[in-house]
Image (cartoon, rainbow, N blue to C red):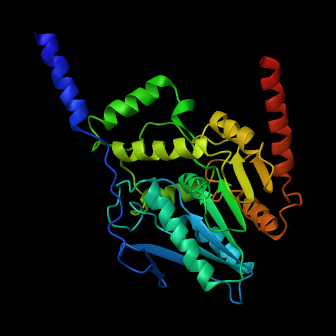
Amino acid sequence: MYNKTAIALLFITLTGCMPIIYPPGIKNNTARLSNSFFFTEDGVGLPLRQWLPKTEPYAIIIALHGFNDYSSFFQLPGEYFSNSGIACFAYDQRGFGGTINRGLWAGDTAYTDDLLTLITLLTNRYPKKPIYLIGESMGGAIIINTMSRQNVPTVAGIVLSAPALWARSTMPWYQTSLLWTMAHSMPWLTLTGKGVKVMPSDNIKMLRALGKDPLVIKATRIETLYGLTDLMDEAYNNAALLNGDTLMLYGDKDDIIPKKPTYDFLHTFLKTDDKEKTVAFYQNGYHMLLRDLQAETVWNDIAAWIKNKSTQLPSGADVRARNILTETISRTMEIN
């Protein structure tokens, strides 16, 4: 009798709590841009940062931040690219930075819809200028999912900086089981990550500044982690569907997104030959490639790729990636 009661209580606990998505409201507004906000169709103002060149830009960049981060992640790259004649825009995505519902997951559809809306707004503002998308980590996964849809706006190019591709299919079973159990029993619980031994960047000064920044989320709800994992699942599975010329960047010392899901994604992604595709592996690169100590090397590669997608990157990181991926594929064939 006791065992049946315990099982019944456990079932009620697990089914009574579910990870919740906090989606946008009704779309009854006209999307628009101000100097400091991107106003969406449901009337929400997402904080917006702009880095504009002094003269007419020759290209436009939309930059998407990573998990628990916000638009300031692009401050130094934005200054670099704007000085090169590129207009840059970055916004706080829903649930992050200075947005309402801070810390709450808005769902993949909300994130992709917001990006598509901003692409349209900037296409209207700069009708004859090429638009490029740059996404770091979670931002990269959102770009993958957005540009894997049918009938999406044409962009000139996509830059994925260590995109979040750690799908459940590449995680150990105990990790996915624990995440599911916690998300369906204590979705409101927050985790800080204290005690986890990872090094997201070699730029210690930058990491300390992030630790003091009140707009960087330090404690994450379990249901938000669950939503992020759903996002990564979809991005990983969209490897063959990504529309657009793409530059993908990855650091050999990335402690956040493991090599296996990244390499598996690339092996599928590179099989489709309809678009220009460049992969760059940085030997001394960490997860935050755009803010590492060698970040300017990465910025320079991106700028060179934007100007001419078919030439070798100045750093040679694309040649290194080709060699590593060729060797990896050869080893896989030998094992099979």
Residue at 35% across, 59% down: 23
Residue at the farthest left position:
1
Quarter location, residue 326: top right
Image side of residue 243 versus residue 230, left or right: right
What residue is at 82 percent from the left and 37 percent from the top?
Answer: 324
Looking at the image, which residue is at 61% across and 46% down?
238
The residue closer to the viewer here, 206 or 75, is 75
Q: From the top left corner, tell me how far across and down residue 16 is, in percent.
A: 21, 36
Q: State the residue in front, 323 or 38.
A: 38
Count the numbered circles shown. Answer: 0
Instruction: Using the image, determine if residue 103 lies above or below residue 268.
Output: below
Above or below for 259 versus 275? above
Q: Is residue 51 visible?
A: no
Q: Quadrant of residue 214?
A: bottom left
Q: Position of residue 76 (x, y in %)?
A: 63, 69
Q: Position of residue 201 (x, y in %)?
A: 61, 50
Q: Residue furthest bottom?
A: 55
Please state, as top left, top right, bottom left or bottom right, where the N terminus lies in the image: top left
Residue reaching furthest to the right: 311
Q: Looking at the picture, does residue 37 appear above or below residue 92?
A: below
Viewer-closest of 81 and 309: 309
Residue at the far top in the pictured view: 1
| The C terminus: image quadrant | top right
Q: Is residue 210 visible?
A: yes
Query: Residue 102 location in percent, x, y?
Result: 34, 60
Q: In the figure, is residue 269 to the left or right of 71?
A: right
Q: Quadrant of residue 103?
A: bottom left
Position of 229 relative to 142 (above/below): above
